[in-house]
Image: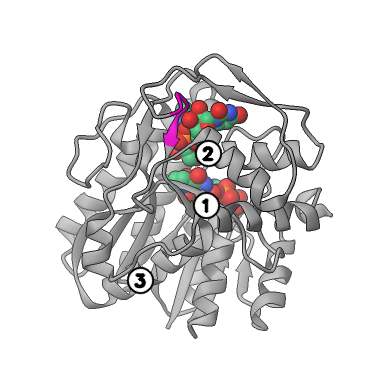
Amino acid sequence: MAVLLTGGTGYIGAHTAVTLLEAGYQVVLADNLYNSKAEVVNRIERITGKRPAFYEIDVANAAELSKVFEAYKIETVIHFAGYKAVGESVTKPLEYYKNNLNATIEILNAMRNYGAKNLVFSSSATVYGPYGESPLKEDASTGCINPYGWTKWMSEQIIRDAAHAYPELSCVLLRYFNPVGAHESGLIGEDPNGIPNNLMPYVSQVAVGKLACLTVYGNDYPTPDGTGVRDYIHVVDLADGHLAAMRYCEKHTGVEAVNLGTGKGVSVLELLHAFERVNNLTVPYKIGPRRAGDVAECYADTQKAEKLFSWRANRAAEDMCRDTWNWQQKNPKGYES
Ligand code: NAD
Ligand code: UD1
């Protein structure tokens, strides 16, 4: 029995592959390399001593996907594949809906055709939209403000409807908060294309000298220091959360949405200063205006993950900052270094 990781050479997929290989699972990666590099497979092998199978395919293509299901007896799919840039989704909505929704539909079809029962889906805290109050529980109201968010929301709905129609399925919708950090080896990490949109990769690229200065998007929010508060979670904790979710799926049927976060809010300035302190460096920054679509605070209520999966995040902001910097220093040009 094998576990298929769609989007498996991406940032979170690669870390989850390491966790699953180390836990003894047979791992198959499928990715079209739209936003990742084949070098990731070598790095996973260097860390674990095991080489996962890798298929360079578009998982929204039924024929290509069926080749993987023909070759391996897939019991579980962890579905990471998708486009994820919020701003780009506003200018290219049709590409986002087409890729992200077709991928989810074709995965479910293939699972039905080949008798795979368990699905863990990469959703996002973005489905809570800008209205909910933190700490966010899974039953908080949902709704989105950009096409990327809606693709997650709609994929959740498609999976819920499939789980209702096909009761043998077991599905977990993982709502990630803010994944950051890298494997402690520094061999795998986040390798964004172009100028990063997210805070942690931006901070580390300023620190390494690729970018001149961080702009803090607003210091007039109703938060302790006026800057935005988020729930940053170490990507290795997140990977462990996938293993726990998979094990839950193996013993249950139906569908559950579950937050993966630390439950702890950290402000932009707190994260920035932790990065400077832990890594003994200075990151130039200036205060700018708020970014459209941002909320003051967004952090998880983590009780459901603790109850269902017996899982909780262990790593602190300091670990996230140290491991990000270790990866950045060892790979100043990402996987092309
Ligand atoms: P990533 O871009 O690093 O990984 C996604 C991978 O999917 C990429 O390697 C890309 O090449 C691949 N892909 C995209 N469309 C594909 C297709 N049709 N067929 C095959 N491969 C395809 O992103 P990530 O940060 O690892 O995120 C993984 C998942 O988690 C995504 O679905 C993302 O939306 C979701 N998510 C990420 C975050 C975050 O902050 N990183 C937060 C919440 C949710
Ligand atoms: C963003 C996305 C969200 C997505 C998430 C994870 C938007 C509006 N939201 O959320 O949909 O699910 O990433 O991919 O894009 N910040 C700065 N300067 C920067 C970058 C960020 O001050 O250069 C601040 C932001 O204002 C925010 C915090 O840092 O307060 C975190 O930002 P970011 O990493 O982009 O994550 P989110 O805003 O949570």
Specify whether residue 69 is in view.
Answer: yes
Estimate the spatial distance between the alpha carbons at disc 3 and disc 1, rounded to whole Å.
22 Å
Residue at the disc numbered 1: 317
Q: Quadrant of residue 50?
A: bottom right
Residue type (three-letter) at the residue carrying disc 3: Ala
Q: Position of residue 247 (x, y in %)?
A: 32, 75
Estimate the spatial distance between the alpha carbons at disc 3 and disc 2, rounded to whole Å.
30 Å
Question: Given contact means CB atoms under 8 Å apart, are the residues at marks 1 and 2 in contact?
Answer: yes
Decide: few, some or many residues near mark 2? Use Cα within 10 Å; few <14, some 14-19, many ≥20: some
Mark 3 vs mark 1: give the one in front. 1
Quadrant for the C terminus in the image: bottom right
Residue at the disc numbered 2: 270
Q: Position of residue 27 (x, y in %)?
A: 53, 76
Q: Is residue 250 left or right of residue 279?
A: left
- Residue drawn 64% across the image and 80% down it: 48
- Residue drawn 60% across the image and 32% down it: 197
Residue type (three-letter) at the residue carrying disc 2: Glu
Check disc 2 and report its element: helix, strand or loop.
helix
Which of pointers 1 and 2 lies earlier in the amino acid sequence? 2
Residue type (three-letter) at the residue carrying disc 1: Ala
Q: Quadrant of residue 185?
A: bottom right
Q: Which residues are magenta?
A: 225-229
